[in-house]
Amino acid sequence: MGDVFGGRYERVDALAGNRWRVWDDEQKVYLACEFVDDAPGPLSGLLARIPTTAAHLAVPVVVGGAAGGPALVLSPLVGGQVLGDRLAAHEPIDVDNALEITDQLLAALTVLHGAGLVHRGIADHVVLLCAGRRPRVILGGLGGVAETADGTRDTRGLGAAVGTPGYMSFEAFSGAAPDPVQDLYSVGALLVQMLTGRRPSAGAVARGGAEVPAQYRGTPVGDFLGHLLATAPARTASASAARTELTAVRAAPTAQEPASGQRARFAEPFIVEDATPDLPPEWGTNGPLPARVSEHLVHVVRTPEAADPARPAATAGERPAVRGTPGRWALTGVLLCALAAALLLVMWLLG
């Protein structure tokens, strides 16, 4: 049995993307969980701002979250595959599907930023592609959110994380106060990864940040990327403004045609398999299995036959009597029949 948190959430096994599967013993359901080792005190209140009907967001519930203590960020368990694993196992994603995924991420950020929050942890391991035949995105990794800086105080350190190397903007890397435009840079870096199949370099921020792939420069997609990856003053101002620009890019007749080089290919349709691992042997669809059932999965439990009360027990030094079996009597009969046949054969030969 795994660790139990809050008296009801039991850790079951590890999932992809720094997530765990836990069992809610009160609601009798499996949930996805992110463990935050050093949770800020206001984490629960910050995440409570997210509307429960928010699209493309893993709307979480926080357990614990005392200042400086561990917390569980819980969300529904959805079958699918994290984007990083998808890219590692396949070719780069084609432009149409990459832009669709980007649009859904921007929709999630529009809600998050509207609640006065900055994600700060956007990367390929926090984007879940739901199982199905078209791109459907859920943005997780909300354990490191922070409140948007209001200009009167420094909110650095509110979250447990400030970003993932390669996806962080220069200002986030430099320790600037949380700002929504930092998330937009991360979305741009993620779009470059989807189009090229290569994770952004952790050292790119020291060289001025991620760059637009050469084959997309001078195209609507390249211009859109350039606005997301620009330095903070020139970067797209908001997630909603980025969605508006993206809508125009997707409508442009040449949006999907790189200026040079081969176009990124991907098997059509965009099929996402459910990569959720099977449950461990001691767990079933309805929760933990009874101990007797768990033992039976490993070995067959036999119940010994009851002793015959009419038969006296053997005394010390005495060998217990061996009871005959039907198989032994059958063997004796076969031997007697063979002996009789041999005698008849001898008598016939002598006569």
Image: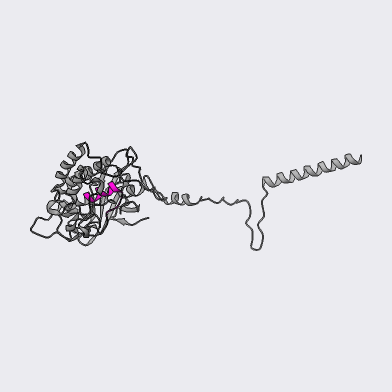
Query: Can residue 173 be seen in this snapshot?
Result: yes
Q: Within the image, what quadrant is residue 257 found in?
A: top left
Residue at the extreme front of the image, as rendered: 260
Q: Is residue 133 magenta?
A: no
Residue shown at 32%/48% (left/top)? 87
Left or right placement of residue 163 versus residue 265 in this view = left
Q: Position of residue 239 (x, y in %)?
A: 16, 46
**Furthest-left residue in this view:** 152
Quarter of the C terminus within the rendering? top right
* 85 relative to 249, above or below: below
Q: Who is closer to the viewer here, 309 or 140?
A: 140
> Quarter of the image containing the N terminus?
bottom left
Q: Is residue 15 above or below residue 153?
A: above
User: Does the magenta-highlighted stretch encompass residue 198?
Assistant: yes
Q: Would residue 76 be found to the left or right of residue 242 on screen?
A: right
Q: x%, y% of residue 94?
A: 29, 42
Q: Nearer the viewer, residue 185 or 65?
A: 185
Q: Position of residue 39 (x, y in %)?
A: 22, 59
Which residue lies most toward the bottom here?
317
Q: How many marks?
A: 0
Viewer-side residue, 337 vs 322: 337
Colour setting? one colour
Which region shows up in magenta? 187-200
Query: Which residue appears at 80% of the width and 44% of the height?
Result: 339
Q: Main secondary structure of the magenta part?
A: helix
Res 26 seen here: no
Give the residue displayed 16% in from the left and 42% down from the top.
Answer: 245
In the displayed orientation, state which residue is furthest to the right.
351
Residue 120 image point, x, y percent: 20, 54
